[in-house]
Every structure is written in C-alpha cells, then in structure tokens.
Amino acid sequence: MAIRRILVADDEESIRWVLSKALAKQGFAVDLAANGSEALELFRRNSYEMAVLDIKMPGITGLDLLSKIQEERPEVLVVIMTAESSMKNAVEAMKRGAYDYITKPFDLDALDAIILKAQKASKVTEEVHRLKEELKEHHQLDRSIIGQAKPMQEVYKILGKVAPSDATVLITGESGTGKELVARAIHYNSPRLGKPFLAINCAAIPRELLESELFGFEKGAFTGATERKIGKFEQANGGSLFLDEIGDMPLELQAKLLRVLQEKEITRTGSSTTIPVDVRIVAATNQELKDRVKAREFREDLFYRLNVVPIELPALRERRDDIPLLVEYFMRRVHEEQQVPARGCTEETMNLLKSYSWPGNVRELENTLQRAALLSPDQLLTPVDFPALLESNSVEEAEGSLESLISNKLRSSLAQMDVQELDNLYDMVLHQMERPLIKIVLEKTRGNQVRAAEILGINRNTLRKKIQTLGIDLKRD
C-alpha cells in the first residue's frame, strides 16, 4: 500500500497550513482537522494510509485518536507530533502503536525523512502481504490436499473450522496418509501465516537428543555443549510446531511438553530462566494413543491436552475413487520436477492401481508412480510398468483373496456412508451377504436344498427359513 492520502490533525492553524503545503508539494492528498473529533469523523469517512496527529487537542486527544485508529484500521501509519517537554507522552504513543513521532518545533526535513521511511516500510509491508497471499493461495485446502471422496470432505470440514483458531490439533492416521500436509494446511490457513512452521519427528531423534531439539540448551549445560542452542519451541515462536509421531515421545519429555502447553513457557537445559513462547501445537501419530494411555506408555493428561480437535485421515484404500485424481496430480508433478515426458495410464493400469491395497497409502502411490514414470519408455503406463503390484495381486489371488475382496468392498461401501447415523449395521451387512451367497450355492446345486445346506454347513430347515426370510424366489433366482 503506497502512501497517497494523509490526514493531518492539529489545533494550531499555522501548523496545519505549513504541513498542508509541504505534503501537497510532495504529491500527497491532504485532509485537515482542527481537533480530534473532526479528525475521527474524517478518518471514518475516508481512506488514509497515514495520519499526522498532534498529541494535545481539545476533546479527543492525539493518543485517544491513535488508539481508535489502531482498533479500527491498524494498517494506517500514525506519526505523533509532541512538544519536547512531553517526551513521556511520545513514549506512550509508541507503546500504543504509533509509527514514529516528531517534536515541535520541527524541521520539515525531519518530517520528510519520516515519510520517506514510512514509504519504504509500506512497500515492505505490501510485499509481505503479497507473499502471504501467495503462500495462502499455494496452500489452499483444495489445492494442497488432493481428494474429493466423502471421507476427505469430512476432513476438509474440520480443517476449515479449526484452521482460523488457535486450538491444539491431533492428527491420526496410517503412515503415508499426509499428516504433515494437513498440519501445514492448518498453519497456512491460520492467522499465523507468515510466522514459522517447524516440524520434528519424535521417533526419528534419539531420546537423549529430543529434549535439546525441543527446548534448547545453554553453553556448558553438559559435555559437548560448547555454545547455546535455541530449540524448536523458541524458533517457532509466533508460529506452529508440528510434533510428528508424538506417541514415541519418552514419558519424561511428555511431562515437560504438558507444562509448555499449560504455562506457555519453556526452560532451556542448563538454565533456570523461563522463556515465554507463543506456539500452536499440531501433533500426529499413526498409533492408537488411547491404548498407549491404558498401557501407561502415554500420559492421559497430555493426551487430552493434545486431543482438543482430533482429525482422522482415511487410508487410501478407504477412498479409492480419489486414486485417478492423485495419479493425475503426481504424474504432472513428475513431469514438471523431473523433466520427463508427460505420462498417462491405460484403463487397465488405473484398474490395477485402484485394486491394490496401498499399505503405504498416498506416499507409496507417489513413489510407485514416480518410479514407473522415470523407467517406462512409453507415454502410456501399462500394468507391466508396475511389477510389484502385479506380484502382490497374484499373491492376494492365491492367498485369502475372498476375504481381501470382501474387506476392500466393505471399506469402500462404508466410506460412502455416515456410519454414525446407522443402526443395526451388523444385521444389515450380514443380510446383504447371505442372500447372494445362498443364491449362488442354490444355483450351483440346481436348486437341491439338501446339498446346498450341506455345502453351507447349516440345517436344511434353517436354509428353508432363510430362503423365505431373505425373499429368494427359487423359480426366478
């Protein structure tokens, strides 16, 4: 926001006249007010980038007017004019958010210097605002996280509600489901945008080093501490700290983390001085923390502190309809980042990708596609480009494929429903499985109920009753 229009308020007409002429000469539009009330009315009626206010005016003082401007439009730069004998008021003005102050009688060159500095500051502010908007645009929920399936729509709803707040979030889900991506989306869509986002994997750092990474240490705190180290909490001050694999944090550190969440302050190792920190915590785990609480491997009080807003990410096998979208996204990214020709997939390939269980979830899908795109000589990827998936499917067909098929179909079907609103799900599922099973066996035995009952392992009378209950028409079915 370049400075174009300035509000000048002073009860001395001569001051107003001099400032008006000097500022107009520099190309600024200037509005004049003889007192605080008049200035406030002009401020609320017009748009200003800067205000130059006398500290002492009848009615509303310059300090009072400064406070109102800060409340209503804090982006407006305010310069306070004060007499040399009122330096304590100038200090108070700076505390209340004034951009600068100038003492009377003042040299116009001094005012010019302040305005020049303000012009530069406003350009920096404008650039920071632009970069923030670019960051926000880049990390919009619908761009940074790919998926339209119902389970992901539920995740988006929670994200949209929790991101603007400062609530602690606990993200759960299998490895590779995108927990850090969700944590970043929360940060970049929050008021903390522009402040640090730091991530630390609690499982990847040795227990004896994790405390130093989180809280830092003073020089000489222990052997090898040759200089002070600033921990992640201080580095992330004002922003967000993502604690991945929180379930692997040692119990003694859990107590210290709980204190940080409660007191909002940390103490470096080797120091007795507390340091206030303002950090939003987003934690994640692929473990069932409630089970670890029962096993006394995770503090119950910390669990409830972290679990203010829980977000459960679905496994990729629970949202198979999103696989084509993810394939398109990753193929485009490989093309742009690795400078390989644009790749596509045949229909047979897509069916193969959708039928695989993806135990490594989205991360495994990305790595698999990247490898195939780099190695394949063809523009269209075929099943041959995914030998590991073909081998896995062959194993599944040979071993327990029926259970796997039923499990995958059941997961897919339930993912499209709001399970919380269903009643009698067990009976509903059994009913839908029993009917086709009995129909198929009766077809195989050409309607011989005695043989069908033997194959099914049930009494003939039970079979006859089920035929009636399930509405199986033997003539037509």
Image (cartoon, rainbow, N blue to C red):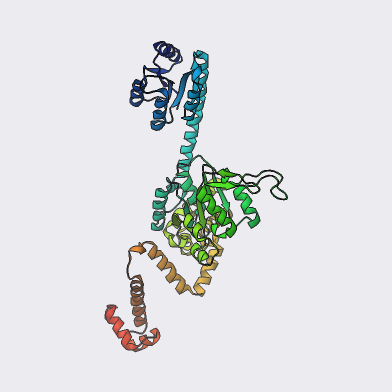
Q: Is residue 49 left or right of residue 195?
A: left
Residue 158 visible in rendering? yes
Residue 339 visible in rendering? no
* Placement of 377 over or under 78, stated as above or below: below
Q: Quadrant of the C terminus?
A: bottom left
Q: Quadrant of the N terminus?
A: top left
Number of numbered discs on residues: 0
* Placement of 363 over or under 127, stated as above or below: below
Percent coordinates x, y for residue 367 in the rendering: 55, 56
Q: Residue at x 50, y 39 (%)?
A: 194
Q: Quadrant of residue 19?
A: top left
Percent coordinates x, y for residue 40 in the rendering: 35, 24
Q: Is residue 353 left or right of residue 48?
A: right
Nearer to the camera, 254 or 139: 254
* Placement of 165 over or under 421, stated as above or below: above
Nearer to the camera, 285 or 83: 83
Nearer to the camera, 222 or 348: 222
Percent coordinates x, y for residue 454 in the rendering: 38, 87
Percent coordinates x, y for residue 101 in the rendering: 49, 22
Q: Residue at x 34, y 84 (%)?
A: 446
Q: Quadrant of residue 444?
A: bottom left
